[in-house]
Amino acid sequence: MSVPTRRSAVLSVLTLIGTLAVPIMAAEPAFASGPLRTHAAARGKFIGYAAANGPLSSEAAYRNIAATEFNQVTAENAMKWDATEPSDNNYTFSNADAIVSFAQANNQAIHGHTLVWHSQTPSWVQGLGASAMRTAMQDHISRVVGRYANSVATWDVVNEVFNEDGTFRSSFWYNTLGQSFIADAFRYARAADADAKLCINDYNVEGINAKSTAMYNLVVSLRNQGVPIDCVGFQAHLAVQYGFPNLQANIERFAALGVDVRITELDVRIPLPADSNEITAQNTYYRNVITACNNVARCTGVTIWGFTDKHSWVPGTFPNEGQALIYDANYGVKPAYTAVHDALAGGPPPVDTTPPTTPGTLTASGVTSSSVTLSWGASTDNVAVTGYDILQNGAVRTTVSGTSATVSGLSSSTAYQFAVRARDAAGNTSANSNTVSITTLPGGGGGGCSAVATVQTQWSGGYVIQPVTVTNTGTSQTTSWTVTFTLPSGHAIVGSWNAALTVSGQTVTARNMPYNGTLGPNASTTFGFQVSRPTGSTSVPSGYTCAV
Ligand code: XIL
């Protein structure tokens, strides 16, 4: 009897009860159920939300979801300059502190957003001259970052410094201080907290485009100057009508620079009213963002910009667009929640099953009596090619890391077939390359030998072959020689001298004795043998060939 599945067990219990016409069953998620943060943590990632102080203080449903589902938080507004320093040297941290203490109570990582931005910065800052503005920036960063040095792990140091074409935004920061305000901001932040990870953040930089490339180039240049920048943030305010960006490739190129990447403000808005295709697209966008981040080790996590459509910046910012988050306005989960959940919960990152490409054309060169040099074109792989198997007559002879190799230890005057295939760390192997066929040269340093047989005497029932003269026809000394010849059917060797004979079918192999294998160039030795044959047969052996 098979063990019932959970679902069939429930059904059979309900059948036994027999009183419910329609069993009431909650829809099961596609994968093991658990809060988002459990599945993210299992991957070593964060899944976060942007916290709004209003509902955080006044709505239990908001607090419950925030605490249960997320292991990271960003203050949606409470750490911005207009909130923390509305007038010069007048700091107000009550809203920021409320979010920090809620996060600490719920074991959530805190991302600081944001120190230097052209928006939500009071007019008293905007009107300063260069020197006073730089001082105000330094004071602000020192005070805010310093206050949260033990609680805020990462900071958006500068936010939205680029135009869409990759030029610098002509903000009051840029216009007053020039590009150097960026490097200065990072240095001031590092001075205030040596341990915090310091990020640059922007929107429309999720795909590979002029703006993200400008950000990429800036990161390179800042790091070359020794400016302390540790991470980049892609806001990811996405909209279903604009298509999904080439996100993973873009994350990968930043990761390759040695900086962390985070998705900082994810939402996916829909033109209203939303139709079912748009809702499906929204689910796909959410799933794709999570998956792209899952797939790159240096992507540290995803922050959703809110979580409930009840509290979202979208309707107030993008007219006639909305429904951008993963809970509806009544705190019910939407399909987008399931998309995020399943992308996080869907097991460990997939095992690599993609084999390398087939190696390029295999060629053989430098054939000797015992070796051959093989060369082939490099393969590529989705992860990396770790080596090439060299197949000798269909079996793996050796594995090498380069794209050429000399195979040695071959027998002389022997035909071989070689092919190569690439392998990766997961053990996937490519298809075999083309096969090359070679025959090794005769041995003896390019030498050879000849065998000339003489019938000394014969009678009706047999004959003596003497001498078989073996001559070194090469240019260097032999150490051994082998003569083969064909014995006519019905004939049998009855004796031999000065060579050891073995018979296989009609082929006789005569090998030198210990005392006559060595022959200098042009030197000869002889051997002989006696054969019996059926009465009436007049034939004698033929096809003498010699190899050294
Ligand atoms: C938005 C907030 O969500 C709103 O509540 C506020 O009125 C304006 O700012 N990029 C950012 C965020 O870096 O700080 C912005 O947040 C959204 C766009």
Image: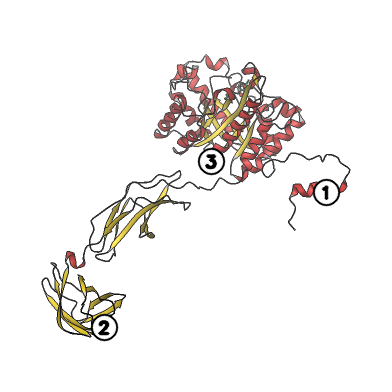
Q: Amino acid at mark 3?
A: Asn
The reply to whether residue 230 is visible in this rendering is: no
Instruction: Kindly identify which residue carries mark 3.
Output: 295
The residue shown at (46%, 29%) is 208
Sooner in the amino-acid sequence: mark 1 or mark 2: 1
Residue placed furthest toward the left: 522
Instruction: Kindly identify which residue carries mark 1.
Output: 13
Residue 135: % across, % down = 50, 23
Sooner in the amino-acid sequence: mark 3 or mark 1: 1
User: Residue 545, relative to residue 157: is it above or below?
Assistant: below
How many angstroms separate mark 1 from mark 2 (CA)?
91 Å
Q: Amino acid at mark 2?
A: Pro
How many angstroms separate mark 3 from mark 1 (CA)?
41 Å
Describe residue 128's horizontal placement relative to residue 97 as left or right.
left
Quadrant where the image shows the N terminus: bottom right
Between 105 and 544, which is closer to the camera in this rendering?
A: 544
